[in-house]
Image (cartoon, helix red, strand yellow):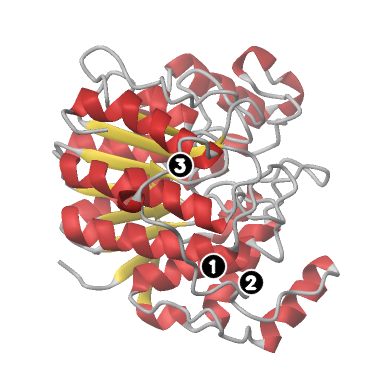
Amino acid sequence: MSGRAQLMWDEAVTGYDFGPSHPMDPVRLDLTRRLVRALELDREVDVVSAKPAGESTLRLVHREDYIEAVKAASADPGAADPSYGLGTMDDPAFAGMHEVSSLIAGLSVGAAEAVWRGEALHAVNFAGGLHHAMPGGASGFCIYNDASLAIARLLELGAERVAYVDVDVHHGDGVQAAFWEDPRVLTISLHEHPRTLFPQTGWPEETGAGGAEGSAVNVALPAGTGDAGWLRAFHSVVPELIADFRPDVLVTQHGADTHFEDPLAHLAVSLDAQRAVQVACHDLAHEYAGGRWVALGGGGYAVVDVVPRSWAHLVGVAAGRPVAPETVIPEGWRQEVFARTRQLGPGRMTDGRWPVEWAEWEAGYDPADRLDQAVLATRRAVFPLRGMLA
């Protein structure tokens, strides 16, 4: 197995563009790639592309009629069929939509293949993590569910157990739906509570079905949760479940929209806490999955100040050369930011909160605390189904 990580990249992914007024501005991908290069992380990874996902691959998760609807909308955006979630405010149709969406999916599938075959220990596709797309429809800025497709490909290649950990601020509903009745896949999502945020799913009582009860895990966090609570929730649920499941591969989704500057959600997490969870996922992969780790991007709509830094940290962690939080960002990148966006870029790779600290669950909990109530609800819903103590 190669000790080097792969960074999946093709400049064509910046064509995933819903238009100038849409919050999912593809400049976030371009600026992330430029920051990775400016920090000289290219020296530590193999930058590779992959073929777009073909129809047989897409059909591992998506219905054939939906794929045909995407193709039709891609060729003629004005004819998009809203019954498939296409041509809506969240998912406007655009020319070439099928081609670029299948490319992003192909990059995630390629990452999974490289890790499974031992061509890379870790693989990152920060253009991926489009976790809301359903088998038969687009949803929440997502056309094809590359995370689900990567997992499905791993199962096709022979993986017996795949764990998926999603720390995007929104519930990973599409991935949960794809594997709702499949005990080979453990899906864990930490997200803002469905009472206050799209997609209004991800309640702790959603635990899987059809022989896969206990394979879906949801931690619904109160709005306003900050670093200490977010990290406490993660460490109070995820490591125990991963240790019990012992996956062949760990797939993680690192939406940056938990950040306190994100305009579309209500958590208060810093870049430093996001980095801490990236490191924790890396360590869990090494402890329980033989080091096999596929890391994806996701949401994130503070496209200058937050997303590029968060995902550059992710690349550094995967490459085995974590970027020190106090690192000064190269001036050349800041100039590129201003040229592209007329915004001033951040100066350092930190929000000034490193090292982040949290209270371990084993030290006790407060039943009157809303964060602890959320963790308890999840543990009580899921752990007994897996034969674990809540």
> The C terminus is located in which quarter?
top left
Could you tell me if residue 214 is visible in this image? Answer: yes
Q: What residue sits 25% from the left and 41% below the top?
A: 241
Q: Residue 192, percent across and down?
A: 58, 37
Q: What residue sits 22% from the left and 48% below the top?
A: 249
The amino acid pointed to by label 1 is Asp
Q: Secondary structure at mark 1?
A: helix
Q: Residue 365, percent across and down?
A: 40, 44
* Label placed on residue 366: 3
Observer-nearest of 204 and 107: 204
* Label placed on residue 351: 2
Q: Disc 1 vs disc 2: Cβ atoms closer than 8 Å?
A: yes
Could you tell me if residue 145 is visible in this image? Answer: no
Q: What residue sits 32% from the left and 20% below the top?
A: 208
Q: Disc 3 vs disc 1: Cβ atoms closer than 8 Å?
A: no
Tell which tag, 2 or 3, sits nearer the viewer: 3
Observer-nearest of 325 and 291: 325
Which residue in the protein does label 1 denote?
272
- Identify whether 256 is placed above or below 142: below
